[in-house]
Image (cartoon, rainbow, N blue to C red):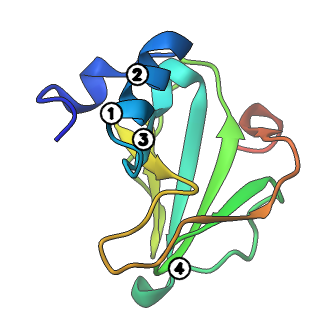
Amino acid sequence: MLSKEGLYSATNDVNQIAKWFLKYPSINIGIACQPSGIVVFDVDERAGGRLEGLPPTRTIKTSDGYHLYYQADPSMHFPGKYREGIDIKWRGYVVAAPSIHPSGTPYKVIDSRPMEDIRMWYR
């Protein structure tokens, strides 16, 4: 464990991040969503989640679905669920590519376009 504080020890300090990777070269990467201005729609195919109706944006393949990354203003509010099989990650963190899921499956970027601004479609 890198930090007992988890997402509360998130940083964008490149020197600190470099130290962590030197000491722990195989660590996974987490993104604190709200402070980063990123909201992630977590599509879980096993729970019936589907991509239909979600605007194209930066997309990561996960072990059981997809993470769709959208830009969001940190003052926005989101419920925890969008619809069946799709959770909204906002007040926590997401594991980012190229991290490795406990199942051994890597998180993989499958659409590298810039993040869509969620304010353009989400109400």
- Quadrant of image for the C terminus: top right
Residue 27 position, x and y percent, is: 36, 47
Q: Which residue is mark 1?
A: 23
Q: Which mark is residue 19?
A: 2
Residue 12 position, x and y percent, is: 52, 15
Disc 4 or 2, which lies upstream in sequence? 2
**Amino acid carrying mark 1 in the image:** Lys
Closer to the eye: label 4 or 1: 1
Figure check: 119 above or below 11: below
Q: Which mark is residue 49?
A: 4
Lateral position of residue 75 relative to residue 25, left or right? right
Name the element at disc 4: loop
Figure check: 78 above or below 65: above
Disc 3 or 4, which lies upstream in sequence? 3
* Separation (CA) of disc 2 from disc 1: 6 Å
* Separation (CA) of disc 4 from disc 1: 37 Å
- The residue located at (60%, 33%) in the rendering is 38
Please say whether residue 120 is visible from this viewpoint. Answer: yes
* Separation (CA) of disc 1 from disc 3: 17 Å
Q: Which residue is mark 3?
A: 30
Closer to the eye: label 3 or 4: 3
Front position in the image: 44 or 80: 44
Name the element at disc 1: helix
Name the element at disc 3: strand
Disc 4 or 1, which lies upstream in sequence? 1
Whether the residues at callouts 2 and 1 have beta carbons within 8 Å, the answer is: yes
Disc 3 or 2, which lies upstream in sequence? 2
Residue at the front extreme, as displayed:
22
* Separation (CA) of disc 3 from disc 2: 16 Å
Whether the residues at callouts 4 and 2 have beta carbons within 8 Å, the answer is: no
Lateral position of residue 96 relative to residue 87, left or right? right
Closer to the eye: label 1 or 3: 1
